Image (cartoon, rainbow, N blue to C red):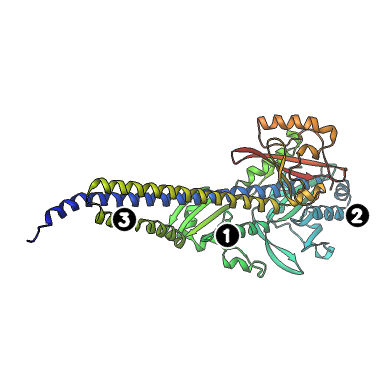
Amino acid sequence: MRVNMSHPVRQFLVAFIPVAVVIIAVAYAFMDLRRNAQVTQITTAERTNLHQLSGFMAAETATSINQLRGLIREEDVRSAINSPSPGTMTSLQSAFLTMARSNLSIQQIRWIDEKGIERARVMRDGEHLSVADDKDLRDTSDQGYFNATKSLLEGEMYVSDFDFILAHGQGDLFTTPTLQVATPVYENGGQERGIVIINIAMQYLLDTLRIAQETNTGTSYALLNSNGYGLSTSEQQDQIGLQTDYPGIEFSGQYPVAWGHISNSDTGTAELDDGLWIWDRLTTEDIIRRLIFAGSVSDVDIPSIHMGNLSLKLVAHKTVQSLNLLHQQELARMTTIPGALLLLAAYAWGLVYFLRGQTIKRQADIEVAHATAREKHMERLKELEERFHLLVEASSVGMVVADADGNIIMSNSAAENMLGYEKEQLTGMNVDQLLPPTKRSLHARMRSGFMRNPAARSMGQGRKLEALIADGSRIPVEVGLNPFRDHGKTVVLASIIDLSK
């Protein structure tokens, strides 16, 4: 006898199809939420890169500003400005050379008189420093940096826009990303005597972008100025140094739609036809002012800084292919659901067994997802810590990181060389040991007070600070303190500048 199976099949389909539709809809909604969470994670990571890059760029610029302020107060420099002669000019050039040796980021130091004529220029060619001959000195009276600085009052500082400037390297001319820092100079009687200007090489910014590129496949980076030009990690940037025209990218022309979004806001994200764009403005100006404030002994000693048109944005571009890969990974996870439902339908003739099996499977999926998320989170934390170590090590400013008890947990080569210690020999020492014995007790109390109310400032504000180096001698230093949170604990990044040079 033929059995009519239509009725039980119809009942099963009536019960199964709505549940299946709900499960698939929830799964796709979960997939979308997961994808949004991944986009948020990418955005957060790139903004972390931005803040680190901004801080190190500002530290480099603030160091050069402080060095320039000290340079124009030196007696040899003042004598040449007041009364130029072959003897005083030789002394001025020696002062310029000494400063350039102390800061490897300096490409040029120049004194330009009140008429815009270069009177002295020291240049870096690779590791070699040289003084320009009189016949090679130029008229710069038509340059924007000269006129902008000449209009300032005594003691005020000018910082140029991020730009590409011709420099020397191994005997050849090449273009390098550069910032210019300048200040007007006057005779003792108040007569204008032109400006002193420093060119600071920002090549390490490109190196930092390359490191980020290597550790984040599928993402490209660009550092843009306000006109939409800048550095990129794309293949065209490999030609830097081999051409004399503008070596960066004309971003506004290559990506007009993305530039329309980026140019209209300081920070944001936009998912366009060509991928995901994440951008933020470098807060370099704010950090420079805080670092200058931290290194000043009084409010009167803080210079007025004119940033010119300095406005930089760091842009991260996640390609369509990488975003699609994330989407496909989520879809791959979803293919197990129809198979699981069919397998359960074949064996599950009762609703109780179906729900029981589904509950067990979902619980297992949740546990696996949590385990995977924890693993990725730990890997990301390790990656960020390694990047932070690379950036600290790349800085020419001496830096140490200490915990709340003053124990040094990290230092860079600049700090170790300054203080006369071997690599990683500072790790585990207490910062109090870097001060003369008579100052340690007071410093420990000041450090405890600072940790109760941590804020970016100089721990030696208003006093002369000395550091005790490894051989027992002492050097005068400036110390800037910048607290931050690391794994839920407050630690302090100390920037140390050697004033003896």
x and y percentages locating residue 269 in the rendered image: 47, 51
- Relative horizontal placement of residue 13, taking residue 201 as reference (left or right): left
- State the residue at coordinates (62%, 67%): 238
Where does label 3 land, which residue? Answer: 340
Q: Residue furthest left?
A: 1
Where does label 1 land, which residue? Answer: 213
Name the amino acid type tagged 3. Answer: Ala
Of the two numbered discs 3 and 1 in the rendering, the one whose residue sits closer to the viewer: 3
Asked whether 281 or 311 is in front, the reply is 281
Quadrant of residue 232 in the image? bottom right
Asked whether 272 or 198 is in front, the reply is 272
- State the residue at coordinates (77%, 41%): 478
Of the two numbered discs 2 and 3 in the rendering, the one whose residue sits closer to the viewer: 3
Check disc 3: other Cα within 10 Å, few if <14, some if 14-19, many if 20+: some
Q: CB atoms at circles 3 and 1 under 8 Å apart?
A: no
Q: Is residue 122 above or below residue 302?
A: below
- Relative horizontal placement of residue 1, taking residue 324 as reference (left or right): left
Check disc 2: other Cα within 10 Å, few if <14, some if 14-19, many if 20+: few
Separation of residues labelled 2 and 3 (CA atoms): 91 Å
Q: Secondary structure at mark 3?
A: helix
Separation of residues labelled 3 and 1 (CA atoms): 40 Å
Quadrant of residue 438 in the image? top right
Where does label 2 land, which residue? Answer: 85
**Is residue 192 visible in this depiction of the protein?**
no
Name the amino acid type tagged 1. Answer: Gln
Q: Residue furthest front?
A: 1
Q: CB atoms at circles 2 and 3 under 8 Å apart?
A: no
